[in-house]
Image (spheres, rainbow, N blue to C red):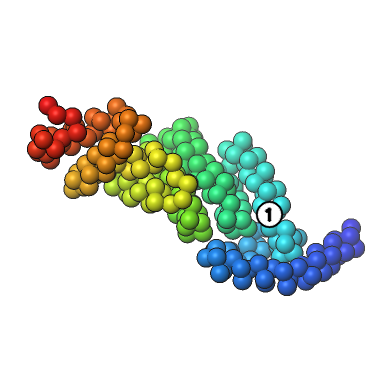
Amino acid sequence: MKARRLVAVFLLAGFGAALLPLQIHLAAEAKAANFRSTALTLDLRERIGQMGFLAALSGFRSPLAAFLWIDLHTAWENTEWGRMAGLIDTVTTLQPRSLLYWDMSAWHMAYNASVAAMQDEKQPSEALRIRAQRQYFQLGRDILERGIRNNPESYQLYQQLGVLLRDKFEDHCAAADAFLKAAELPGAPPYVRRSAGYEMAQCPGREREAYELLRALYLEGEHQRLPTLVRLVQELEKSLDIPAAERVEKP
């Protein structure tokens, strides 16, 4: 058994040495393209073990991350939230450019784990259940923000951050900023800018900015004139005392 393990170690090490020039070239290209990567540190070695670390060093980061993701799914089915958090950290370290891992990991923590914390029958203190719930909210936020740092050109993670800030933190100002950033990035669907306007309309002190954004969307045409958008524009017109001649729907 020990002999087989040694053979496997030498094969992985040899393969890794053969890949080293290619990995250096790819790393240089990634840096030139402003891609972020995650170093293989001793902390990662402690989390995935010697064999896993050698596999990652030898160019098998993607399949190793996929294997650990399956393990993470099993932990989810068993509601092992602490173990899940550790696996999430490892998987996203191995594959920091995978949007799926960041998105799903944040969802697991901010939604699944937070609900489980509030429904934990083993914890009789409601105050402690609420505290645990909020900690999972924050963990989900931290995951998305780390994902954004590794994928700054992706609108999806900014959009998901906006949803989280809106639904779990009820921070309309921060949610508006997240949606606005998402809307500025390539590929963002039109509804993301509407979401930014909706949240901004609920952010004290930004009513004028919200009105200008929503009005501009209204003027784009019928496809933007959804009931919520029309209602908010009309409410902002009244609160900002917009002259009747300038209102989108004249009284």
Left or right of 6 in this view: 135: left
Q: Residue at x 44, y 41 (%)?
A: 189
Left or right of 122 in this view: 21: right
Name which quarter of the figure residue 231 lies in.
top left
Q: Is residue 241 above or below residue 26?
A: above
Residue 12 placement (x, y as % from top left): 80, 64
Q: Is residue 213 above or below residue 30?
A: above
**Viewer-proximal residue among 55 and 3:** 55
Q: Amino acid at mark 1?
A: Ser
Name which quarter of the figure residue 128 lies in.
top left
Q: Is residue 42 visible?
A: no
Residue 75 placement (x, y as % from top left): 62, 41
Left or right of 227 in this view: 94: right
Residue 113 placement (x, y as % from top left): 50, 40
Q: Is residue 93 above or below residue 73?
A: below
Residue 227 placement (x, y as % from top left): 29, 27
Q: Residue at x 48, y 56 (%)?
A: 153
Q: Residue at x 52, y 41 (%)?
A: 108
Placement of the C terminus among the 4 image quadrants: top left
Left or right of 67 in this view: 219: left
Q: Residue at x 57, y 57 (%)?
A: 96
Residue that badge 1 annotates: 62
Placement of the N terminus among the 4 image quadrants: bottom right
